Image: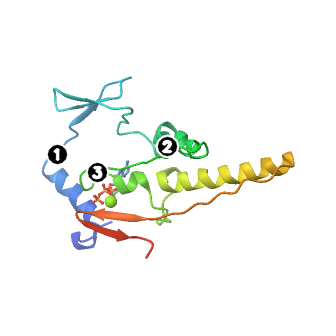
Amino acid sequence: KSLHSQQLPHNFQTMAKEKIEGCHVCTLVTPGEPQVLLGKDKAFTYDFVFDIDSEQHHIYQACVYKLIEGCFEGYNATVFAYGQTGSGKTYTMGTGFDVSLTQQEQGIIPRAVHQLFEGIQNRKVRAQEAGTQPPEFKVSAQFLEVGDTLLFDLFK
Ligand SMILES: Nc1ncnc2c1ncn2[C@@H]1O[C@H](COP(=O)(O)OP(=O)(O)OP(=O)(O)O)[C@@H](O)[C@H]1O
Ligand SMILES: [Mg+2]
């Protein structure tokens, strides 16, 4: 397809620009280690590191699944995306707004919401089957975007 650059989303322009400028991948994941190598000698170690070919469900299962299960045990959890513009924060977190995304491409937020409500439903059904009082759950949600010093309420 030939599109004029004005019609392309901002990020595609950036990626095209990066290609024109001859940018290349500058990170390397140490095989079998949660470590990323920046350039030749700067190594950073984290709880988890995912390489370029990692898929959404893989990241979810490794980092988020246990946190949501933990909510049912009374633990608080935070999942925070941090990175420079265009690094994939929105893609990784997911918004549930993009209906063109396949199931496989769904990000953390829609997966977490699904797991949470499935967990609630399972516990209610189990209580009913056991003939005990079904537990009550209260779920509240806020959807905010932080941009520099500004807060945007994405539900408004
Ligand atoms: N893992 C990925 N696989 C495929 N495409 C991706 C991936 N991560 C990001 N992208 C794509 O790269 C572009 C930039 O990603 P995204 O919009 O998530 O960045 P961002 O960190 O939210 O940027 P900003 O700070 O500007 O909001 C988008 O077009 C997105 O769909
Ligand atoms: Mg974003």
Residue indicated by mark 3: 87
Lower position in the chain sequence, tag 3 or tag 1 = 1
The residue mark sitting in front, 2 or 3, is: 2
Residue indicated by mark 2: 64
**Contact, CB < 8 Å: mark 1 with mark 2?**
no
Ligand 2 image-quadrant field: bottom left
Q: CA distance from mark 2 to mark 3?
A: 20 Å
From the viewer's side, name the closer residue of 89 and 2.
89
Q: In terms of image quadrants, where is residue 139?
A: bottom right
Could you tell me residue 41's position as x and y percent?
16, 26
Q: What residue occupies the far bottom of the structure in this picture?
A: 156
Lower position in the chain sequence, tag 1 or tag 2 = 1
Q: In terms of image quadrants, where is residue 28?
A: top left
Q: Name the side, left or right, on which 73 lies relative to 106.
A: right
Tag 1, which secondary structure?
loop
The amino acid on which the numbered mark 2 sits, given as a three-letter code, is Val
Q: Estimate how packed mark 2 is, as few (under 14), some (14 to 19) or many (20 or more) residues with alpha carbons within 10 Å.
A: many
Badge number at residue 23: 1
Give the quadrant of the C terminus: bottom left
Tag 2, which secondary structure?
helix
Q: Mark 3 near ligand 1 (CB under 8 Å)? A: yes
Q: Name the side, left or right, on which 89 lies relative to 98.
A: left
Q: What residue occupies the far top of the structure in this picture?
A: 32
The residue mark sitting in front, 1 or 2, is: 2
Q: What residue occupies the far left of the structure in this picture?
A: 21
